[in-house]
C-alpha cells in the first residue's frame, strides 16, 4: 500500500511574534512514521509543533498541509477541526488539578461534543487501558507519580482517536526509568495502532535506545538524518 503523506511542508517559513524561527522548511512525513525533532533550546522544535497544530499560522509556504488541512488557508474558527485529528502531549502534563483522572478525560470528551455517558466512560477506560493506568481512574493528579501523570496525558491525547500525536519533550521532567516506560508506550501506540508520532526531545540517550527517523532544527533550518550514526550527540550539550 502506498504511503499516505500526513504532513507536507514545502518552502515554509515559520515565524513567532514576527521573528522567523524556521525558514524554507521542507518536510514530508508519512502516516505511521515515528519522528524525532532534536535541537537546542530556542532552535524551533516547539515552534514547529505549534505550527503543525495550528497554533502558529503558516502563511508563507508553497505547501503547508497537515492531516488533510491546508494551513495556508485555515481559518482560526476551523483550527479546532484540525486539532480533533491530533493528540498533543506536553512536558508538564497540563492536567486539571481540581478533578480526578476520569474527570480530566471526561472534560475533553464533553468539550468535543461527546454526550452519551456510557460511551464517554467506555472510551476513557479504553484510553487508560492503552497506557496501563485503568486502575488509577479515580485518583487525583497529586496522588500520581510524574510518569503516571504523563501516561494520563497520553491517554487524554488518544481520546478522539488521533491520526497524529505531537509530543513536546514528553520525558523532560522524568527520570530515565520512567522515561523508558513512556517511550515503550509511544512506540507501542505507533506500531500497534499506526498513530504517526512526532516527538521533540533533547534527550539523546533515548534516540540511541529507541531509534527512529531524526530531524534537527539548527540555524533556522531543518535537516534530516539518513543515519542516526551521523548525529553529533555532543550537540545536545
Image (tube, grey):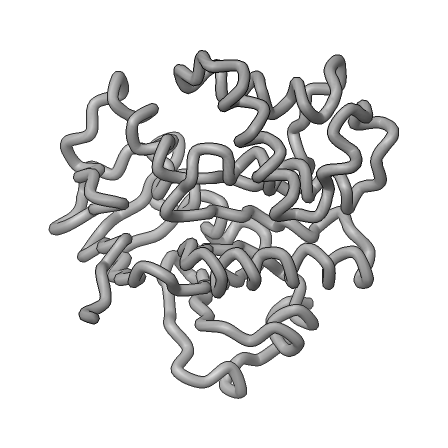
Query: In this view, which residue lies farthest toward the front?
Result: 118
**Does 191 sit above or below residue 164?**
below
Foreground: 178 or 116?
116
Residue 64 position, x and y percent, is 20, 47
**Does 8 sit above or below residue 19?**
below
Residue 46 seen from this side: yes
Residue 3 position, x and y percent, is 23, 67
Corner quadrant of residue 28: bottom left
Would you say 143 lies left or right of 130 here?
right
Query: In this view, which residue lies farthest toward the right?
Result: 143
- The quadrant of the rendering that contains the N terminus is bottom left
- The quadrant of the rendering that contains the C terminus is bottom right
- Which residue: 72% across, 38% down? 134
- Which residue: 38% across, 72% down? 224
Corner quadrant of residue 207: bottom right
Would you say 42 lies left or right of 48 here?
right
Amino acid at each position: 500500500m502506498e504511503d499516505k503523506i500526513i504532513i507536507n511542508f514545502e518552502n515554509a517559513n515559520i515565524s513567532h511574534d514576527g521573528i522567523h524561527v524556521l525558514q524554507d522548511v521542507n518536510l514530508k512525513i508519512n502516516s505511521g512514521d515515528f519522528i524525532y525533532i532534536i535541537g537546542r533550546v530556542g532552535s524551533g522544535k516547539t515552534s514547529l509543533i505549534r505550527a503543525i497544530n495550528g497554533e502558529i499560522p503558516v502563511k508563507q509556504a508553497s505547501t503547508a498541509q497537515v492531516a488533510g488541512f491546508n494551513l495556508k488557508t485555515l481559518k482560526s474558527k476551523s483550527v479546532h477541526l484540525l486539532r480533533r485529528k491530533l493528540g498533543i502531549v506536553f512536558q508538564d502534563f497540563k492536567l486539571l488539578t481540581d478533578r480526578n483522572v476520569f474527570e480530566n478525560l471526561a472534560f475533553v470528551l464533553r468539550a468535543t461534543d461527546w454526550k452519551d455517558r456510557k460511551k464517554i466512560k467506555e472510551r476513557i477506560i479504553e484510553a487508560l487501558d492503552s497506557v496501563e493506568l485503568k486502575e488509577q481512574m479515580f485518583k487525583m493528579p497529586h496522588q500520581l507519580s510524574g510518569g503516571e501523570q504523563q501516561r494520563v496525558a497520553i491517554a487524554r491525547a488518544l481520546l478522539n482517536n488521533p491520526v497524529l500525536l505531537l509530543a513536546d519533550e514528553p520525558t523532560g521532567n522524568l527520570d530515565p526509568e520512567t522515561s523508558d516506560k513512556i517511550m515503550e508506550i509511544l512506540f507501542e501506540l505507533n506500531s500497534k495502532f499506526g498513530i504517526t508520532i512526532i516527538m521533540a526531545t533533547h534527550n539523546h540517550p533515548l534516540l540511541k535506545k529507541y531509534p527512529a527517523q531524526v530531524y534537527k532544527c539548527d540555524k533556522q533550518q531543518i535537516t534530516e538524518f539518513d543515519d542516526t550514526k551521523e548525529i553529533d550527540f555532543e550537540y545536545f550539550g
